[in-house]
Image: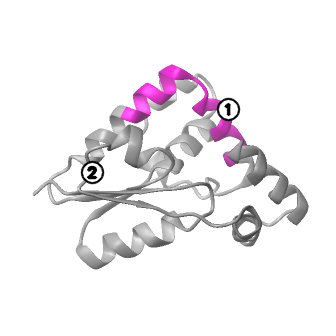
Amino acid sequence: MIFTVAVDGPAAAGKGTISKALADRFGLAHLDTGLLYRAVGAKGGDPVAAAQGLTPADLARDDLRSLAAGEAASKVAAIPAVRAALTQFQRDFARREGGAVLDGRDIGTVICPEAAVKLFVTASAEVRAHRRWLEVGGDAAQVLAEVVARDE
């Protein structure tokens, strides 16, 4: 059975929490698509080659939730060839036998427009910044500024 659930929304809105719970509850594979971009950015070197050669070990790095990895992700996400490679990775994951839950930006519109179920999760910039700050620490005002900048 191929069954895709797309969970979309802005950074730190709760997509990951909801997606993991859905995947666990229904026995579906889960992919946090933001980790793909974070992994590519964290690998360094040629981002296109990194995106094309992404491995499960790349997604298991401990530093992918850091502010630095988030900043690197934003930079590599602007490269069309990186986006193309990771779009294909995500679409292949979404079509896996047994079903899948994918969370991230543009999942329900660009990556999986024909998903069987689509959710859009949101929260205010202040709530999302607080969640991100709890996750990565740092200066709370700076985290809020970064969340607002990413939204723009």
Front residue of 58 and 117:
117
Q: Which image quarter holds the N terminus?
A: bottom left
* Residue 73 magenta-highlighted: yes
Q: Which image quarter holds the C terminus?
A: top right
Q: In this view, does 67 lie above or below 112?
A: below
Q: Is residue 119 left or right of residue 44?
A: left
Q: How far apart are marks 2 and 1 (CA)?
A: 28 Å
Q: For the residue marked with disc 1, what is the amino acid?
A: Lys
Main SS class of the magenta portion in the image: helix
Which stretch did the figure color magenta?
70-87
Residue 74 in which image quadrant: top right
Front residue of 108 and 30:
108
x then y, percent, for residue 111: 37, 40
x then y, percent, for residue 105: 51, 47
Residue 37 in which image quadrant: top right
Q: In this view, does 149 lie above or below 2?
A: above
Q: For the residue marked with disc 2, what is the amino acid?
A: Ala
Reading the image, the residue beneath label 1 is 75
Residue 75 in which image quadrant: top right
Can residue 55 be seen here? The reply is no
* Residue 82 magenta-highlighted: yes
Reading the image, the residue beneath label 2 is 115
User: In what element is the residue under mark 2?
Assistant: loop
x then y, percent, for residue 68: 74, 47
